């Protein structure tokens, strides 16, 4: 009798292990599927990041170009103002 009891207990343990194994196998498949989806999302985000980076870089370059043009224009105007202020001084002596 003890042998039958031990075999029955062993059968329950083995069945429980098989059930747990199947549950873990299913969970692994679900996690792998989720991982694949996340990897695809990451790749898509990398592409978006590259696109955004290019666009932002283009905007920065445009701003720098406008600043350089504006600065050169202001420097030219300052030079003209100084020349205009100095011109009447020389015309007084004439």
Image: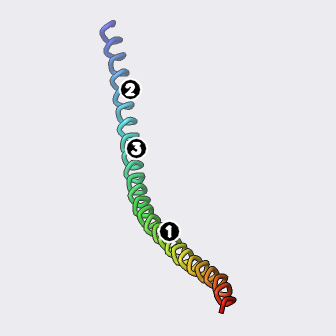
Say which residue appears at 37% left-offset and 40% top-offset: 28
Is label 2 in contact with label 3 (beta carbons under 8 Å)?
no
Element at badge 3? helix
Of pointers 2 and 3, the one earlier in the residue sequence:
2
Measure the C-alpha gap from mark 2 to mark 1. Answer: 63 Å
- Is 41 left, or right, of 91 in this rendering? left
Element at badge 2? helix
**Which image quadrant: the C terminus?**
bottom right
Q: Is residue 22 above or below residue 63?
A: above
Residue on which the image places disc 3: 31
Colour style of the rendered protein structure: rainbow
Say which residue appears at 38% left-offset and 53% top-offset: 39
Of pointers 3 and 1, the one earlier in the residue sequence:
3
**Who is closer to the viewer here, 68 or 85?**
85
Q: Quadrant of residue 26?
A: top left
**Which image quadrant: the N terminus?**
top left
Element at badge 1? helix
- Is 15 left, or right, of 79 in this rendering? left
Measure the C-alpha gap from mark 2 to mark 3. Answer: 22 Å
**Who is closer to the viewer here, 70 or 8?**
70
Q: Is residue 69 above or below residue 40?
A: below
Which residue is farthest front?
93
Residue on which the image places disc 1: 60
């Amino acid at each position: 009798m003890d042998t039958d009891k031990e075999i029955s207990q062993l059968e329950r343990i083995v069945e429980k292990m098989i059930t747990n194994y199947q549950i873990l196998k299913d969970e692994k498949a679900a996690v792998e599927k989720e991982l694949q989806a996340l990897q695809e999302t990451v790749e898509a985000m990398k592409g978006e990041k590259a696109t955004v980076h290019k666009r932002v870089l283009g905007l920065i370059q445009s701003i720098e170009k406008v600043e350089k043009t504006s600065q050169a224009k202001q420097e030219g105007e300052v030079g003209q103002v100084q020349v205009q202020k100095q011109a009447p001084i020389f015309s007084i002596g004439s």
